Amino acid sequence: MKTLRLAALISGTGRTLKNLLDLKAKGGLPAEFAVVVSSSPKAAGISFAREARIPLVVVNRAKFASDQDFSRALAAAILPHHVDFVVLAGFVHLFLFPRELEGRVLNIHPALLPEFGGRGFYGRRVHEAVLRSGAKESGCTVHIADHQYDHGPILLQRRIPVLSDDTPESLAERVFQEECRAYPNAIRKLAEES
């Protein structure tokens, strides 16, 4: 099994990154992180990159007028590291990645795509929408990203029941526990196929 070189893109708490780093430290993830790129200088997840001594680049989304300009700056931060895959780890912006990264950008979404995905569907908003809809199950989806929000070939999904007393917070926590299994499983699968 190949050890994959990864770039991680973050925007917020960094919980997804932390889960992957913890698994790697225990020998449970065939990967090394070449760089972490944050879309905000205030993202709490920056601390995890620093603790793990991973090169960190902040590409502040607020400083760019368009998705295209922002995406060019992201690519400039990633491509010199010659990564096998880019993992979107709680990254909430559109990444219009260059052709060199096509088929190599992974995303995890806290719902069963194609339902409850798209622009603006992240975090609590997803779980609120699931509960409002009356859906009987939810879960998470790992997919190969393309240039649309929450779109592209699905690698795997994990499902959980929606409970009658679920709140957005309780559903979010149970979905996140599935994410903590799903993303590493998808990365392991890609490592086996590489």
Image: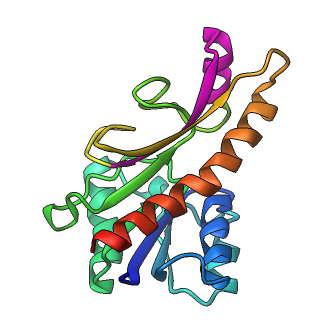
Tell me if 81 is positioned left or right of 179 in this view.
left
- Outermost residue to the bottom: 53
The residue under the point 49% across, 49% down is 108
**Start-end of magenta stretch:** 125-144
Q: 44 or 109: nearer the eye? A: 109
| Count of all numbered marks drawn on residues in the image | 0
The residue under the point 74% across, 40% down is 174
Magenta highlight on residue 165: no
- Outermost residue to the left: 99
Tell me if 95 is positioned left or right of 160 in this view.
left
The residue under the point 72% across, 37% down is 172
Above/below status of 65 relative to 83: above
The percent coordinates of residue 170 (x first, y second) are 81, 33
Q: How is the image coloured?
A: rainbow
Residue 39 in view of the camera: no
Magenta highlight on residue 140: yes
- Name the quadrant containing residue 71: bottom left
- Name the quadrant containing residue 17: bottom right
Query: Which quadrant, please, contains the N terminus?
Result: bottom left
Query: Which quadrant, please, contains the C terminus?
Result: bottom left
The percent coordinates of residue 184 (x first, y second) are 53, 63
Above/below status of 57 relative to 189: below
Q: 65 or 46: nearer the eye? A: 46
Q: 25 or 87: nearer the eye? A: 25
Residue 159 in view of the camera: yes
Tell me if 184 is positioned left or right of 101 in this view.
right
The residue under the point 26% across, 44% down is 147
Above/below status of 133 relative to 161: above
The percent coordinates of residue 10 (x first, y second) are 54, 61
